[in-house]
Image: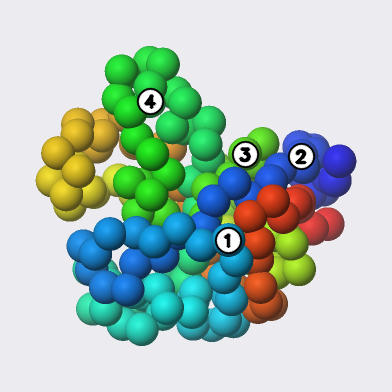
């Protein structure tokens, strides 16, 4: 296990990768994806400027992550089934305390990300899915990240903090 220097060691894994070619388009599962520093994930709506929020660009929205543990909690605590692709997040993780990575650098395989800010749930997602996920996802909606050092990520890659 690695320690981020802030006292919370972890070693997680990348479970899934998803992109969408444009706003509201179905998410496509990938085994691997190229993350381009300062841009986003090749082929994803936000890297090409075709996302719902592309008109409001933010450096920390280059790639989005969500914990599989959040999906498990939705099912357990709220009876809501939500698959990784339905979250509209790019990377689904396991064993990674995403909320604790705000303001920190961490590694996914050979790629280095910076946890810029927590993702805020939106009514758009609830409307798109037809599932009451807005309130249950408050403070658990994932992490918006900046790509500090690009490269290829693959399902199964280790995720660990950088000191």
Tag 2's secondary structure? Answer: loop
Q: Give the mark toward the camera: 1 or 4.
A: 1
N-term mark: 3 or 2: 2
Q: Residue at x 79, y 58 (%)?
A: 162
In the picture, the disc for residue 61 is none
Q: Specify whether 149 is left or right of 79.
A: right
Which mark sits nearer the N-terminus, 1 or 4? 1
Specify which label sits upstream in the sequence, 2 or 4: 2
Please give left or right for residue 15 compared with residue 112 in the image: left
Distance CA(mark 1)–CA(mark 4) = 25 Å
Instruction: Tell me how many marks there are.
Output: 4
Measured in 3D between alpha carbons, the distance from the residue under mark 4 to the one under mark 3, in whole angstroms, is 15 Å
> In the rendered image of this protein, does residue 25 appear above or below residue 151?
above
Q: Earlier in the sequence, mark 1 or mark 2?
A: 2
Kindly identify which residue carries mark 3: 94
Which marked residue is nearer to the observer: mark 3 or mark 2? 3
* Secondary structure at numbered mark 1: loop
Residue 158 at x, y percent in the picture: 75, 51
Residue tagged 4: 74
Which residue is under mark 1? 31
- Are there few (<14), some (14-19), or many (20+) residues within 10 Å of tag 3? some
Q: Residue 10, which numbered label?
A: 2
Task: Point out the tag, 4 or 3, that comes first from the N-terminus.
Answer: 4
Q: Can you give x and y, in whole percent of width and height, for residue 62 in the image?
A: 47, 71
């Amino acid at each position: 296990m690695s320690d981020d220097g802030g006292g919370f060691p972890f070693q997680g894994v990348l479970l899934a990768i998803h992109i969408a070619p444009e706003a509201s388009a179905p998410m496509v599962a990938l085994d691997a994806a190229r993350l381009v520093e300062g841009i986003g994930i090749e082929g994803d709506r936000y890297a090409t400027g075709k996302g719902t929020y592309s008109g409001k660009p933010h450096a920390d929205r280059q790639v989005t992550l969500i914990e599989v543990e959040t999906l498990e909690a939705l099912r357990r605590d709220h009876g809501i089934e939500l698959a990784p692709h339905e979250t509209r997040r790019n990377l689904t993780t396991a064993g990674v305390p995403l909320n604790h990575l705000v303001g920190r650098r961490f590694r996914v395989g050979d790629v280095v990300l910076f946890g810029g800010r927590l993702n805020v749930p939106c009514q758009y997602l609830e409307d798109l899915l037809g599932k009451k996920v807005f309130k249950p996802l408050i403070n658990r909606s994932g992490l918006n990240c900046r790509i500090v050092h690009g490269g290829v990520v693959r399902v199964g890659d280790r995720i660990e903090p950088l000191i």
